[in-house]
Image (cartoon, rainbow, N blue to C red):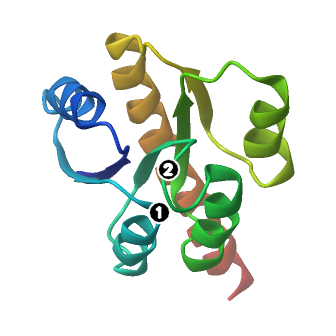
Amino acid sequence: MYQVLIADPDRASRDLLMQALSVDNCSIKAVCSGEEVLQEIAKKETDVLIVEVHLPDIPAWELVPQVREIASEVSIVAVTEDDCWEISRRVRVTNGPVFFYGLKPLNLREMQDVVRYAVQWRQRQGNQIESMLITAQ
């Protein structure tokens, strides 16, 4: 079982994502702010973070580096209604990388696939690191 953390100030968006992802074998938590994201990430239980770019207290382009500092292995999926190139670049490239950057309204089937792929990617990364450590010994 894997852990998904959804951070979105909009309750309807959170509920919709939670419902869509509940069909998979995952545990889902939802929060409203960047500060809550950092508290949850510090617990080292999150596999995938789905974060709205425009959180009320910390924008994603500032939050992503903080998440990476605490838990670099977390796969980050950024979502927004704002189709602005500059914001996309900030989030995806400058302070990323993020696993996926999606525009709302979200395709829920696509989001299910994105989360599955993010978990698989994370597991492969962990296996590669473990393999390198075993080889080095």
Nearest the viewer among 5 and 86 is 86
Compared with 122, 14 (above or below) is above
The residue singled out by tag 2 in the image is: 55
Tag of residue 34: 1
Tag of residue 121: none
Q: Residue furthest front?
A: 56
Name the amino acid type tagged 1.
Answer: Gly
Compared with 121, 111 (above or below) is above
Name the amino acid type tagged 2.
Answer: Leu
The picture quadrant where one finds residue 42 is: bottom left
Q: Quadrant of the C terminus?
A: bottom right
Q: Position of residue 18 (x, y in %)?
A: 20, 35
- Is residue 32 found left or right of 120 in the rendered image? left
Give the class, few, some or many, for how many residues have Cα within 10 Å of label 1's Cα (few <14, many ≥20).
many
Q: Secondary structure at mark 1?
A: helix
Taking the spot 54% from the left edge, 22% from the top edge, the residue there is: 81
Nearest the viewer among 65 and 121 is 65
Taking the spot 34% from the left edge, 80% from the top edge, the residue there is: 43
Nearest the viewer among 98 and 136 is 98
- Is residue 128 found left or right of 32 in the rendered image? right
Nearest the viewer among 116 and 62 is 62
Q: Secondary structure at mark 2?
A: loop
Taking the spot 13% from the left edge, 27% from the top edge, the residue there is: 23
Q: CA distance from mark 1 to mark 2?
A: 6 Å
Q: Which of the two discs, 1 and 2, labels the residue nearer the N terminus?
A: 1
The picture quadrant where one finds residue 47 is: bottom left
- Is residue 40 found left or right of 130 in the rendered image? left
Taking the spot 47% from the left edge, 63% from the top edge, the residue there is: 34
Q: Position of residue 48 (x, y in %)?
A: 42, 50
Tell me whether the residue at label 1 lies in contact with that at label 2, contact meaning CB atoms closer than 8 angstroms: yes
Q: Position of residue 36 (x, y in %)?
A: 36, 68
